[in-house]
Structure formats: structure tokens, C-alpha cells
Image: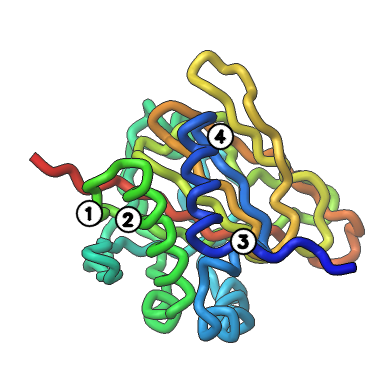
Amino acid sequence: MTGAPAPSPAALLDRMRDEVRRSGCTFVNGEATKLLLTSESIESWDAFAESWNDLGADTYMADGGGYRRRRHAVFQLRRGVLLRREHQPHFQSRDYNPLNGGVQRWFEPIGATVGASILLRDLVVACGRLIAELEPGQENVHWIEVHQFRIEPHADEEAFPTPEGMHRDGVDWVCVILIKRLNVSGGTTRVADMTGKEIQALLLANELDLVFLNDRCLAHAVAPIRRMDPRRPGFRDALVITLVAHRRE
């Protein structure tokens, strides 16, 4: 007896579009995410994920935490082509990030190989295709920020993927993609509406599991993580893509 055939990429995007229209967010497991990638992307996965071992320390943590490492880059998407912009600071007002906002944060840039990778391109293009489904006519995305995050708990302490708590990012759309989890527990992603009512709680547990949400009407947070075995290294690696859709007059 064989299982049901895998959906086509178009059918998957239709499902994602319908779920976002209905609830503001969609969850896709890693095996389904691969439907949105080319075979070349999938073959490059190991090298892409390995780049998380070379992230710089986040020196802007107002809570004094030394558990977060990251890199950052800014892009545009024009007619399906991903274009990198000059390196610049990441900025959020304190309205959106009361802990670390209000200052220009200069993070180390995403490496040239990662920034030009077909895997990153395919993931961002998939986000762009979904946005075009949700907002017909929005074929370009004029502001895209990409963040590589590693959250690395110390031996017997919690670490906080979102130390600012439940929040919005101040953009239109947010996509969070799990790269790897090693020797950690916790890290449930929670999504809430503007009244604070939780509408979904899910765990990004496997590589390429993702959640895509409408940042204009939903907030999100990720629960603390802790090493399961405090004697061994542990971390949670994630790719966060935030997008501001191109607005036509």
C-alpha cells in the first residue's frame, strides 16, 4: 500500500495562501518545504547549514545575554531575481522591540557565498510567490532583511530566541525557518492576534520546518530553550526572513 502522492509546489502554495488568508499564518514541515526548492538547492543544504557555525556575537543584547550569535543582510526581489543591497544596520523602534530597539544595530554581514546561494534565493522567491498570491499585483518585494540566528544556552541556563517576548517586527510578512536543533528542549513558537489571544503554538523541530505569518495583524514569540544534557553543546539555528511588499501607486 502506497501513501498519498506529494502535493505539487503550486498546490502547496495554494494551501499556504488559504491558511494565511484564514488565520494570518501557515506552518509547513520540512519535507513539504523541499517542494519549493530546486534539486540543486537541496543538494547544497549541508554547506548552507554549516555556515551557522561562523556567526558573530550579538553585542546589542540589553539583557546582557551572551547566548545569541547572528549575521544579517538586506535584499530586494524584482521579478523573481534576488538582489543584494549594500550592508546596513538593522533598526527597530522601541514600539516593536522594547528591549533591543531604538538603536542602529550593525551585525556582521551574511557571507557572500550564503548570500548568493541558490538555496537562499529559492526560499526568498517562495516567500515572494506566496505574497503575490496573497496580494495580487505585488510581484516585487522592495525590502527584505535576512537574519541567521544561533541561540546557544550555557550549561545550566535558559536562552531566549525572542528575548523581547511576544512582538511584531514592524514589517508586512515574517518567515522563520528552522535550520538545526541540537541537544535543546523548548523553543515552541507561539502566534497571537492583536488582542493577545494565542491562535497557534507549534514547534519547529526538523530542518526546513517553517512558519510564515502576517506581521501586520499577528505577533509571535519563541519560548526559551535549555540544553537537555548540560555537559554537551546545544543550540537552535534559524533563518528569519522579513519582507515589506512593494507598493504600487
Q: CA distance from mark 1 to mark 3?
A: 30 Å
- The reply to whether dot 4 and dot 2 touch (C-beta < 8 Å) is no
Hey, what amino acid is under mark 1?
His
Residue 217 image point, x, y percent: 43, 26
Residue with the mark numbered 3:
7
- In the image: residue 223, left or right of residue 26: right
Q: Which residue is mark 2?
A: 144
Q: Which residue is mark 4?
A: 220
For discs 2 and 3, the disc positioned in front in the rendered view = 3
Cα–Cα gap, marks 3 and 4: 28 Å
Mark 3 vs mark 4: which is more N-terminal?
3
Give the SS element for disc 3. loop
Mark 2, Cα crowd under 10 Å, few <14 / some 14-19 / many 20+, is many
Looking at the image, is mark 2 or mark 3 earlier in the sequence?
3
Q: CA distance from mark 4 to mark 2?
A: 19 Å
Residue at x 42%, y 83% (from the top left corner): 113
Mark drawn on residue 165:
none
Mark 1, residue position = 142
Marks 2 and 1, how far apart at CA: 7 Å
Q: Are marks 1 and 3 in contact (CB under 8 Å)?
A: no
Circle 2: residue type = Ile
Q: Residue at x 66, y 40 (%)?
A: 189
SS class of the residue under badge 2? strand
* Residue 221: x %, y % from top left: 60, 36
